[in-house]
Amino acid sequence: MEEGNGGGGGSGAAAGVRVGAESSEPKRASVRAMPHEECVEGIRSALKNPTVRFLRERMEKAGCQVWPRLIQAATCSDAGGYASGHGIKVCCNHMAFQDEITQVLIHELIHAYEDCVAKNLDWKNCAHHACSEIRANHLSGDCHYKRELLRGFMKIRGHEQDCVKRRALMSLKNNPYCSETAAKDAIEAVWDICYNDTRPFDRAP
């Protein structure tokens, strides 16, 4: 794990291109940001989480490079992000609780896993990016009903799928290669295949 600073939490496949495989959380000005040192310790603690360990083990089993600096504690504009070839950033200035750090790691490790095992994944392709965001938001537990209630979304029926689509769209709108219309079309086009693709889990956790 490495400490560092970055301008954003997006992800990109090519050098100089940041296309956002981001943890799409709204900014909360009223919540105290976690001190950097506490955040670093939080990342170390999150690495012991069973789901985080499972994802790292599956990456190693698939032959993915899980390098020592895969995960960085950073100061940046989003909750966190994954960049192809650069790894995962946990944006400490957006973290307030241990659970948030753990969720960012789970979400971004799904992106990292997919970036390794998927053939010809192109983050500039709206459909590819949409698929990765659908899977990460669905499989990470980001859209559990308790998390949605805390965000102020009170819908009971169909909340999880609505949440996945909403959060996927938030990330795709940060992709300079995807207009909002193209992002919405991409999410709908790949929805059935990607929502039901639970790899590396046997089923959605």
Image: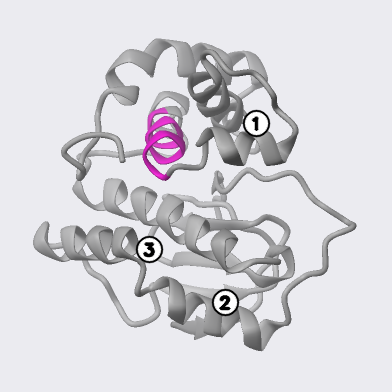
User: Which of these two is toward me, 198 or 62?
Assistant: 198
Residue at image point 55% right, 21% down = 159
Location of residue 125 by image quarter: top left
Q: Is residue 8 above or below residue 25?
A: below
The residue labelled by disc 2 is 73
Crowd tier of the residue under label 2, counting other residues whose Cα lies within 10 Å: few below 14, some 14–19, many 20 or above: many
Residue occupying the far bottom of the picture: 37
Q: What stretch is highlighted in magenta?
A: 131-140
The residue labelled by disc 1 is 173
Query: Does the CB distance between marks 2 and 3 fall below 8 Å?
Result: no
**What kind of residue is marked 3?**
Gly
Choose the circle earlier in sequence order: 2 or 3.
2
**What kind of residue is marked 1?**
Lys
Choose the circle earlier in sequence order: 1 or 3.
3
Left or right placement of residue 195 versus residue 176 in this view: left
Give the main secondary structure of the magenta stretch.
Answer: helix
**What kind of residue is marked 2?**
Ala
| Disc 2 to disc 3, C-alpha distance | 16 Å
Choose the circle earlier in sequence order: 2 or 1.
2
- Asked if residue 26 can be seen in this view, the reply is yes
Location of residue 163 by image quarter: top right
Residue at image point 37% right, 34% down = 135
The tag on residue 85 is 3
